[in-house]
Image (cartoon, rainbow, N blue to C red):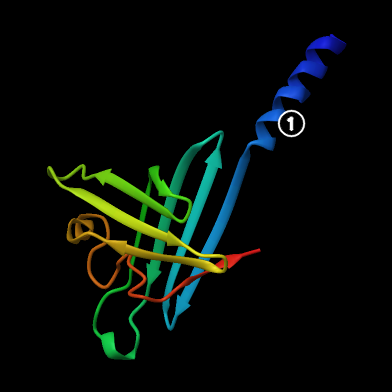
Amino acid sequence: MKKTLFLTIAMLVSGGAFAGTEHYILRDGNHVQHLKITDKNGEVTVSADVDFEANANEKDRPACSASLTDEAKRVDKDNLIVKKHSEVDASFCELKINLTDTGAKIEQSKDCDNFAAGICHFSTEGKELVKVK
């Protein structure tokens, strides 16, 4: 019994030693964007979510929320690409994520409109999501 308990604890601790999660957030008026990057044993998973309510220049536009989660390909130390297949049609949403020491910037392909419609979008439009420490 003690051996089993010890092995279970050792596996949990060793698995956690190779896992890391980073969070990034951007609040721009009534727009909130969140990015979560999890690297577990070299497998990178990205989760991006947005919650937008209309800013003053977007009045009469409905609020929206969107999220996207999938495995990412590491292009290099500071760049990730996520490609998510649309369940609606034969398109892909591609997010290009550029990481810095203090945050992250996201660019999205035009087909991401199938995932984030209306005023919602995953692109940070040149602004930087701030890394949460």
Q: Residue furthest front?
A: 76
Q: Is residue 37 left or right of residue 124?
A: right
- Residue at 24% in and 84% down: 60
Q: Quadrant of the N terminus?
A: top right
Q: Residue furthest left?
A: 90
SS assignment at label 1: helix
Near mark 1 (Cα within 10 A), the count class, few <14, some 14-19 or many ≥20, is few
- Residue at 61% in and 39% down: 19
Say what amino acid the circle numbered 1 marks. Val
- Residue at 40% in and 67% down: 51
In this rendering, the answer to whether 25 lies above or below 59 is: above
The residue identified by callout 1 is 13
Q: Is residue 74 left or right of residue 18?
A: left
Q: Is residue 30 left or right of residue 12?
A: left
- Pinpoint residue 92: horizontal percent, then vertical percent: 20, 47
- Pinpoint residue 116: horizontal percent, then vertical percent: 27, 61
The quarter of the picture where residue 17 lies is top right
Q: Nearer the viewer, residue 66 or 44?
A: 44
In this rendering, the answer to whether 67 lies above or below 102 is: above
In this rendering, the answer to whether 50 lies above or below 46 is: below
Number of labels in the image equals: 1
Q: Residue furthest bottom?
A: 56
- Pinpoint residue 115: horizontal percent, then vertical percent: 26, 55
Q: Quadrant of the C terminus?
A: bottom right
Q: Nearer the viewer, residue 79 or 91?
A: 79
Q: Nearer the viewer, residue 132 or 73?
A: 73
